[in-house]
Image (spheres, rainbow, N blue to C red):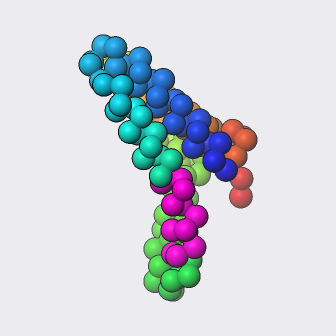
Amino acid sequence: MRLPYAAVALTLVFSTAAHAQNQGIKWWQPVLVIGAIATASLADGAVNDWVQDRRTPQSDDLARIFRYGGEPEVTFGIGGGIVVAGTIAGKPEVQRSGIFGMSLDRIGSPGGQGRTP
C-alpha cells in the first residue's frame, strides 16, 4: 500500500527537480515535500484507527456523501473536463494538469490497476 505513495513522491521529485532548474527552487524543497508525504503515510494507520473508533451515525452520513470522490468515474470525468477546457482555451498547461490528475488515479491505486471495490 505504500508503493503508490512512493510513486507519487517520485513523480513530484522529478517534476519539481526539472522545474527547479528554471525557477530557482532549492534542493531542500522537494526533500521537504517527500518528508511530509512520508510523515503523513506513517501517521495514516493510527489516524484511521482513531477515527474508526469514534464513528457516529452523523459521521457515517457525511462519509457517504464523499464515498465516490476517488472513484475512476469522478477522477476521469473531472480530469477529462479540465483537458477539454484547456483545449478550448488553447492553454496546454491546463491540458497537462487534467492529464496529470487522471494519471494519479492509475498511479495511486494498488498495483496501478485502478481502484478496486
Q: Nearer the viewer, residue 11 or 59?
A: 11
Specify the quadrant that holds the C terminus.
Answer: bottom right
Between 37 and 96, the residue placed more toward the observer is 37
Residue at 51% across / 83% down in the picture?
54
Magenta portion: prevailing SS class = helix
Q: Which residues are magenta?
A: 40-51
Examine the rendered structure and indicate whether residue 110 appears above or below residue 21.
Answer: below
- In this rendering, does residue 18 appear at all? yes
Looking at the picture, does residue 59 appear above or below residue 15? Answer: below
Find out whether residue 48 is within the magenta segment: yes
Give the percent coordinates (x, y) of residue 19: 36, 19
Question: Which residue is depicted at the point 71% across and 53% down?
Answer: 116
Asked whether 44 falls inside the magenta stretch, the response is yes
Considering every residue shown, the one lying at the far front of the view is 28
**In the image, residue 76 lies at what x, y percent?**
55, 40
On the picture, is 53 further left or further right than 1?
left
Residue 35 locus on image (x, y percent): 44, 43
Residue at far bottom of view? 57
**Nearest the eye: 4 or 73:** 4
The answer to whether residue 88 shows anywhere in this view is no
Q: How far across and how far down the image is residue 24, in percent?
A: 26, 19
Q: Residue furthest left?
A: 24
Q: In front: 65, or 45? A: 45
Instruction: Answer with left or right where residue 112 lies relative to residue 23.
Output: right
User: What residue appears at the point 48 percent right and 23 percent down from the top-left corner?
Assistant: 14
